[in-house]
Each structure stands twice: as C-alpha cells, then as structure tokens.
Image (cartoon, rainbow, N blue to C red):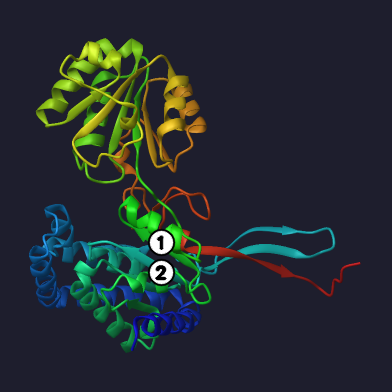
Amino acid sequence: MSIESTVVGMAKAARAASLEIAKCPSDKKNEVLIAIADNIEKLASHIQEENRKDLARAKNTGLADAMIDRLTVTDTTIKSMSQGLREVAQLNDPVGSTSKAWLRPNGLKVSRMRIPLGVIGIIYESRPNVTIDAAGLCLKAGNAVILRGGSEALNSNQALAGIVGHVLGETGLPQETVQVVPVRDRKAVNVLLNQEEFIDLIIPRGGEGLIRFVVEHSTIPVLKHYKGVCHVYVDEGADIEMAQEICYNSKVQRPGVCNAMETMLVHQSMAQEFLPKMAELFVKAGVEIRGCPETCRILPGAHKAGESDWPEEYLDLILSVRVVEDMEQAISHIAEYGSSHTEAIVTRDFNRGNRFVREVDSSVVLVNASTRFNDGGELGLGAEIGISTSKLHAFGPMGVEELTTTKFLVFGDGQVRS
C-alpha cells in the first residue's frame, strides 16, 4: 500500500472506532486503562528490546544526546507509563456530564453536556512515553487517536500501540481506537494533516519548528504551543529567600523544558540586594546570565543582553535578567516578549499578586511558586496531552476534560417557535 492509502485508511478506521469508544461506559474504559498498565509491566522486556533497536539506529544516525535521552525507555519509564494510566483511570469521566442548566420563559429546559472531540491526531518527537500518555487520555475522554511519533521511535511506539490494541481487542472495543502511523517517511505527516473529513483536531508536541510546520500545512484545527518564554518577576519587598528558591528551581531543575524560566525580572528596589546573592547560586549551577545595563552594573560578570535575548527560549542554562522600575513595566515586558505560557510573581503583597494574576495573559500564572508547576500532573489533571498557548478551545495544560467539548441539550413539551 502507498503511504497515502495507509494513512487515509487509518483515518477512516479511526472515525468508525470513535463512534464506538464514545459510547463506552466509564467502568469499562477504566478497566481497559488498568489492563494496559498491567500489560506494559508484564511486557517490559519486549518494549525495551524494541526500544534498543531504536537506540541503535539513533546512535548510528548521529541523533543528539538529549534526543537519545528522551528516546530511552528505562525501568523508570515503564513504571511511569503504567502508573500514569492508573492515575488517569482514577479521574472523573467528563463524558456525559451536564452543566449550566436553565429554563427558558417558554418552558424549554436547556443544558450543556460534555462529549468527546472525536478523532485526534497527535504528532510528536522522540519520547515513547507520549504514546501511552496520549492513548490513555484520549481513551478516557472517549476519543480515537492516531499517533505519529518521531521516526527515531517507531519500533518502541509500535510495541506500545500493539499492547494497547491487544487489550482493546480482548475487551471488545475496536483496536483502531489507538493507531500508530507505521511509516518513517515524513510524507505521512502531510497526508495526515489533510484528513479533515475524518480527524477533528491535531495536537503537535515538540520543538517550535515542528509546530510551525504542522500549523502551516494542516487543514485541520491545530492546538498550538510554539515555545515557552517563561518569566519570574521578583516584586518590591519580596521575601528574598523565597525568591531565590523559586527562581533557582524555575531555571535550574530542568532547564530544557518548556516551563523553565527564561527571563528573570527584578524590581529596582530589590536589585542591589537580591541579584548578587541570586547570581552566586546561578553561577555555581553553571547558568550564564545575560543582563540589561543595570543588571550588568550590579553583576560585572554578566553578559550584556541583546534585543534578541528577551524573546528567546534557551532551553539551556542561560538566563536573561532585567531590572524593572515597577510591576507595570514587568507586565509590559511580559506582554511584549512572552509566549503566553507561564509567568510567576514573588511578592508579599496579596493585592499586587492579584493584580499580576489578572493582568498577565498567560496559560498559567503563579503567585509565590515555581514556573515548573505548569504541568498537568502537578496541577491535578492526572496527566496532560500538552500545553496549549492558544485559546481555542483550551488554554494551558490539557487533561481529560480538555479533550472533550460540549453540546446543547434542549427538552421541550411540544413548543414551536412563532
């Protein structure tokens, strides 16, 4: 079969499967999720054997060490995947829940009910665990899903999808509910992005280049997350020890992820006392500081920041630092250079914290907490399928509920419109 016929066939099959999985009761979906988790643990050696094939190919093709690290399925990865599925099984099922009921003057009873989105296409890089995270969340929300992982992870992804499909078949659900595109050729992505007749939503997970490619070529709605230019603003009068811990964690714990701090903004009244102490901690951790003129005056070892630094997502131990006159300038800086991802304020003033939350337009805004908490698991969603920085139809980490939409229900007693 050609690549086009393969992908089109998968899309048609996914549409048919979506009609079945949408009707699946919560108890059965939860049983399936737990059975998949059990089978992942039982078949760990098979998964890791297939993963070793991917790793060998990746090393031969010169894949970067960071990508190889993401590609590797360890015992911890196996445990994390199975545990994640069990946590998703424990979540409330949003499908079928109703809300916002009201009575019209003519006696019509109107409400809204949550329903699955239908068929979701997910395009991602390297990490085989995304295959299971995505499959689990889509199943819980009553959706069918087509997964197109990176070509470097094809063997791993097919092994995982095979386990999911086996469990679905055993429980009487269509195996086509979860499918992995079985070819490495990038043409498959282009074909997938043009199946608007069968696919309802595309979710890309990966670098900015991948996401922009998907947005430019898709005829299907895309949930976007270009990059994470995240800020921490240290407010006037902030607790210095708290600010140090939050800023350090936001930057250093995992600098290569989208919710790591890329720019630190410091109120001018705090700069002289706060920056030298903070810089000492950062330098010990290997962080390169690129600062505004005032930052460089206080920290002679800092590099001068250029205009291109402020909107930059470094994903590395590099940090932009700017001293600001007041909160208004901090908020203006975020509005100009941010990516609507994650912003935090460290403050002792409740009212100023509330103002920051109201006026900063990002998917997650934190008061006195690290930017690293913008994560579905950390925010109580159980898991996430990605972080949306566009506002249609979700904004921020996407859990089970964000993989559903609503329809109107209207109950009458013979009413007709005049």
Question: At numbered mark 1, what does the secondary structure look like: helix, strand or loop?
Answer: strand
Q: Amino acid at mark 2?
A: Gly
Instruction: Please tell me which residue is depicted at 39% across the width and 75% down the height of the picture.
Output: 29
Image-quadrant location for residue 316: top left
Q: Could you tell which of marks 2 and 1 lies nearer the N-terminus? A: 2
Horizontal relation, residue 175 to residue 283: left or right: right
> Residue 287's x, y, as percent?
16, 31
Residue under label 1:
203
Image-quadrant location for residue 163: bottom left
Instruction: Please tell me which residue is depicted at 48% across the width and 73% down the height of the picture.
Output: 199
Q: Are marks 2 and 1 in contact (CB under 8 Å)?
A: yes
Horizontal relation, residue 114 to residue 42: left or right: right
* Mark linked to residue 83: none
Q: CA distance from mark 2 to mark 1?
A: 6 Å
Judging depth in this view, the residue of 346 and 278 nearest the camera is 278
| Residue 391 position (above or below residue 120) | above
> Residue 341's x, y, as percent?
40, 42
Residue 1 appears in the picture as rendered: yes
Question: At numbered mark 2, what does the secondary structure look like: helix, strand or loop?
Answer: strand
| Residue 332 position (above or below residue 215) | above
Q: Which class describes the residues within 10 Å of circle 1: few (<14), some (14-19), or many (20+)? A: many
